[in-house]
Image: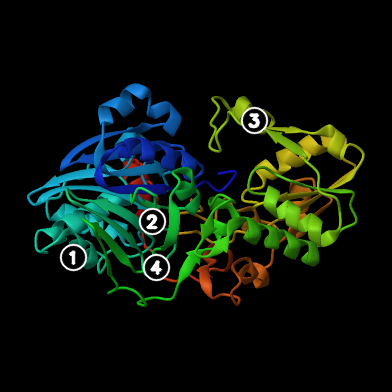
Amino acid sequence: MNKIHEECGVFGVYAKEKTTVASTTYYGLFALQHRGQESCGIVVNDDGVFQYHKDGGLVNDIFTPEIMAKLGEGNMAVGHVRYGTTGASDRLNAQPIVVNHIKGKMALAHNGNLVNSYELRQELEMEGSIFHTTSDTEVISYIITKERLKAPSIEEAVNQAMNRIKGAYSLVVMSSSKMIAARDPHGFHPLCYGVTKEGTYIVASETCALDAVSAKFIRDVEPGEIIVFDGDEIRTIRDHIGEEKKHLCIFEHIYFSRPDSIVDGVSVHHARATAGACLAMEHPVHADVVIGVPDSGLDAAIGYARQSGIPYGIGFIKNKYIGRTFIAPGQKVREDKVRIKLNVVSETIKGKRVVMVDDSIVRGTTSARIVKLLREAGAAEVHVRSSAPPFLFPCYYGTDVDSQENLIAVNHTMDEIKEIISADSIGYLSLDHLGMLMGVPKGEGYCSACFDGNYPTEVPSETCKNRFECKLSERRNKK
């Protein structure tokens, strides 16, 4: 893990009449592609008949004109783009999950990680449940289905399931006749909804996906809230609102979300620019130019330049044909993939003292390679600034920081990190300034557990994210 990888993106469409909901979902997922590039899927509901397609790959590659034609029209659809933090990155784990049960059909798309997934799965398996995937999402689908056998409606089943599932989840659930949006009581990850001028309701992980389908933003789904789209009605279930304090993942504003999104009322671009300004105040330096590492380091670099008065420059050109999770075959090629993704604009940095702003430093290997590129292009000095604090603890809510083993800040001092990445100086955003990104007091309204170890929930005793793909020898060693 050289960089933090993305979350997942969920998208839902609820139209009053039969229409091209598959196309709408396609464009919505395209706007959310930054949240996951391993797999994607769309389920279309045509008067209770589900047509779906999902596979490993990018939205544009998977949903060909032929596939879109097969999906046809309908009055509802659910879509998903995935970066897997639990479960292997194969086709089986692609979402949405489709379930056929005695009371009907259900399609489910999920963003986040449960902290009690392992216990729930063991319980379900002991009851005879057979799992086809290794993701948390199938656990959620089983719990909702079990509750549906007793509940009078799908929304009440979701409501009861929220008493059992713990951790991070933003859900879009589709039955034969309803669409439901639900967000965990902590509000770890974003979820919002809007409406098109035709009266079609859209649920999405980010507002940028609403923009992509010309939907007007209505509001965010509140932490703990369930919203039901049913006929001409929109109903809310608020039983779980206020159960917990809000803990939106701060990394949504630092890295995950697109800069043109508004997450829980805060502009992502503004939050990142604020982080850059804070960095300039905390870690000033005499330099000639400020550059950002594409993509999520650019806004912070602009903020650093504005605050410091040092000119902002375009330091890198990113190959737009390579996704964020580009994987190259062979170790030698993997080592050179930074060169393939980024090329230095030598005119900007040659002979100059450079401030290089990036969103984070995880293992340090990518930062070292980027610094090397700048020096080879003639930079006189390279001062590295991170718009995130040092990663010191695992995340259990959907970010793939699953252990402390490879985190550079855990194993090295600041001076050692500076030497490892060959920088002239290094500076991280402090924990004290995190609240400024969201305009809230320090420690209120956001989760920063990966930086400070203050977990909002109990942490799972089983921490292996691919626990169901472990070899027998690995399982024995854990016992």
Q: Judge from the rendering whether residue 311 lies leftward or rightward of residue 152; answer left or right.
A: right
Q: Badge 2 local density, few (<14 within 10 Å), some, or many (20+)?
A: many
Label 3 secondary element: loop
Q: Position of residue 364 (x, y in %)?
A: 67, 47
Disc 2 from disc 1: Cα separation: 22 Å
Q: Which residue is mark 4?
A: 222
Residue at 36% across, 23% down? 65
Residue at horizontal 43 percent and vertical 38 percent from the top: 27
- Which label lies toward us, 1 or 3? 1
Amino acid type at circle 3 is Asn
Ranked by sequence position, the earlier of labels 4 and 1 is 1
Upstream in sequence: badge 2 or badge 1: 2
The residue tagged 2 is 113
Pointers 2 and 3 in contact (C-beta within 8 Å): no
State the image quarter where residue 329 is shown. top right
- Under circle 2, the secondary element is loop
Cα–Cα gap, marks 4 and 1: 17 Å
